[in-house]
Amino acid sequence: MLKQINGLHHVTSLASGAQENNAFFTKVLGLRRVKKTVNFDAPDVYHLYYGDAAGTPGTVMTYFPFPDAARGRPGVGEVGTTAFAVPKGALPFWEERLGAYEVDGLIRTDRMGETRLMFKGPDGDGFALVEAEDDRAPWVADVPEDVAIRGFHSADMRLSPRGAAASGELLTFMGYEKEDTQHNVTRYRVPDGNEAQVIDITEVEAAHAAQGAGSVHHIAFSVDNRDKQLEVRKALMDTGYQVTPVIDRDYFWAIYFRTPGGVLFEVATNEPGFDRDEDSAHLGEALKLPTQHEHLRARLEQMLEPIRD
Ligand code: ZN
């Protein structure tokens, strides 16, 4: 069993409009845009990152917005809900705020003794706010500090029974402990993690998901550094997983592998971080391009959808 994984690092999803996506995460949810760059593998598409002040691993929601992308079709083999932690007592504030912004799908539910407010993102993305004890300091701009989002609480993978069993085994191998099962949901938690340390598996019989706008593309798990990442990579490969080589994403190093339930996992380093190429007072303001795409800047600045802050 591995000991290197701290919990979630980031969650990456697909969107349609960049402007709408940016407004939702910064103005409605009150996160900080910590990086405006492009998809390193397809540089004519933005890669937008939203999180706390520094983009601390465990707080970072990221998007590839494809203009005019069709919506995904929910199903099994994907992350169905990404949950953010908010302080105890914060949900009435959020219910009113999200209602005022005419956010879709507002429903209060209870899971594992925690109250959660479910809602949909601009492309039908599945989100929840969960009241939790959480010491992380929030980014404070458009939402008051005492109710602001602290970072991720958890990600919920919607899987077939077979995928759920195999993915549960994988999470256990990665250092998660099975904590509880209620109804068709099993909760896994990595001990002494980074607060974003819970993964839920919801077992359902349904058609396979079709990825599109509003779908989670992959979830990334945090390790402290490159040495630990290499240890995880070797352990996964020794177990039979096909893992990519280490890829430099400028703000972290990444490896990827497909899990038995169908969800794409990444393991990402906490180093070097989002202040690598921008002053921390101005994170996310300028369009940052990786060195290999810098020669495309003039064309990209012309073709990418303008984002008004
Ligand atoms: Zn990623």
Image (cartoon, rainbow, N blue to C red):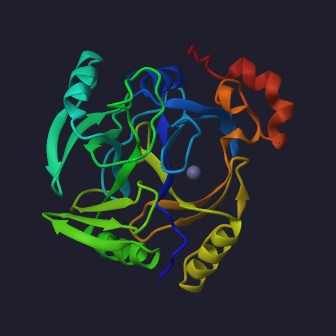
Residue 25, percent from left and from top: 45, 28
Residue 258, percent from left and from top: 51, 66
Residue at 87% in and 32% down: 295
Residue 209 visible here: no
Number of callouts:
0
Determine whether, in the image, residue 236 is placed left or right of residue 16. Answer: right
For the C terminus, the image quarter is top right
Residue 163, percent from left and from top: 33, 70
Quick check: 39 above or below 253? above
Q: Quadrant of residue 200?
A: bottom left
**Residue at the right extreme of this rendering:** 295
Determine whether, in the image, residue 179 is placed left or right of residue 302. Answer: left
Residue 95 visible here: yes
Residue at 32% in and 67% down: 188
Determine whether, in the image, residue 111 is placed left or right of residue 166. Answer: left
Give the camera-side residue of 218 and 91.
91
Residue at 46% in and 60% down: 7
Give the camera-side residue of 45 and 177.
177
Residue at 36% in and 38% down: 125
Q: Quadrant of residue 130?
A: top left
Quick check: 190 above or below 253? below
Residue 191, percent from left and from top: 39, 69
Q: Quadrant of residue 230?
A: bottom right
**Residue at the bottom extreme of this rendering:** 238
